[in-house]
Image: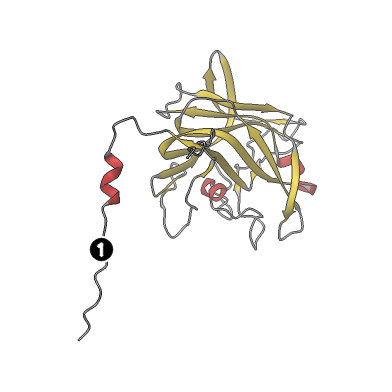
């Protein structure tokens, strides 16, 4: 009979595939670095009061949790608090094809390279609207070195936000989706926030989700087979 047609597109998978969990990761507070199951998340800074650390952008607590403050929050004074939008203060700079992006960042290292086709950002509304990202860039790299990044997606005042729920303090939680046309696979994905929506000194990220596909194994690579050995469950004899 006729063969079924193969799907033309591989469905997108959410990354990280794990949920960061304080009881499971290794941490280095000096470098704001957290490692779990092959994933490492780090940030330029975070607001240490209440441990609003970068890993909280990857723990699937989408609405801020029972305390309403489960998120990554940049440290006090990250943004200029005088302009609207507020520009990053003392940010790190990354130059790609002669364009320099300066801001505060959250970096994810993955166990395998991915092509990030869709990115979802969660942030807050109401009196916290000013703390949402206004301008930024998602960069990819295979080394993570400062001078070795490529652009996955930029935005500048053009994020389209929609409410998906409320947090424990009854503030709106909103999402913005970005689609990327990148054809490249990267081991590192970094979100650099260049400015926030309103006059303020922080940026507030409830959650980040990267949707994409892993780099296919090269043809003839049978290394995966070692994990697929059959195990037979023998019946208990039971005396």
Residue 147 vs 28, above or below: the answer is above
Q: Secondary structure at mark 1?
A: loop
Instruction: Classify mark 1: residues with Cα within 10 Å, few (<14), some (14-19) or many (20+).
Output: few
Residue extending farthest to the top is 98
Q: Which quarter of the figure has residue 208? A: top right
Left or right placement of residue 149 versus residue 69 in this view: left
- Which residue appears at 45% of the width and 22% of the height? 148
Residue at the spot 38% in from the left edge and 45% down from the top edge? 38
Left or right, 102 with reference to 197: left
* Colour scheme in use: secondary structure
Q: Position of residue 23 (x, y in %)?
A: 44, 60
Total marks shown come to 1
Residue drawn at x 55%, y 35% as measured from the top left? 105
Q: Position of residue 42 (x, y in %)?
A: 48, 41
Q: Is residue 222 above or below residue 147?
A: below
Residue 136, image x, y percentages: 64, 29
Q: Is residue 186 above or below residue 202?
A: above
The image shows residue 217, relative to residue 58, as above or below, that is: above
Residue at the bottom extreme, as displayed: 239
Q: Is residue 176 left or right of residue 18?
A: right
């Amino acid at each position: 009979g006729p063969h079924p047609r193969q799907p033309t597109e591989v469905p997108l998978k959410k990354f990280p595939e794990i949920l960061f969990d304080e009881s499971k990761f290794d941490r280095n507070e000096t470098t704001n670095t957290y490692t779990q199951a092959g994933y490492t998340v780090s940030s330029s800074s975070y607001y240490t009061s209440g441990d609003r650390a970068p890993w909280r952008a990857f723990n699937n607590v989408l609405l801020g949790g029972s305390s309403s403050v489960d998120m990554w929050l940049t440290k006090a004074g990250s943004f200029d608090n005088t302009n609207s939008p507020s520009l990053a203060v003392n940010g790190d700079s990354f130059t790609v094809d002669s364009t320099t992006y300066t801001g505060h960042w959250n970096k994810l290292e993955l166990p395998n390279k991915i092509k990030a086709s869709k990115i979802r950002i969660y942030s807050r509304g109401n009196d916290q609207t000013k703390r949402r990202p206004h301008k930024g860039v998602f960069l990819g790299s295979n080394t993570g070195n400062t001078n070795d990044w490529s652009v996955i997606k930029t935005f500048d005042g053009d994020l389209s936000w929609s409410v998906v729920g409320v947090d424990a303090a009854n503030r709106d939680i909103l999402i913005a989706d970005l689609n990327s046309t990148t054809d490249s696979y990267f081991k590192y994905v970094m979100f650099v926030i260049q400015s926030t929506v309103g006059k303020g000194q922080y940026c507030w990220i409830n959650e980040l989700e990267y949707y994409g596909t892993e780099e296919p194994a090269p043809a003839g690579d049978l290394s995966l087979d070692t994990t697929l050995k059959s195990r037979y469950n023998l019946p208990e004899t039971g005396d």
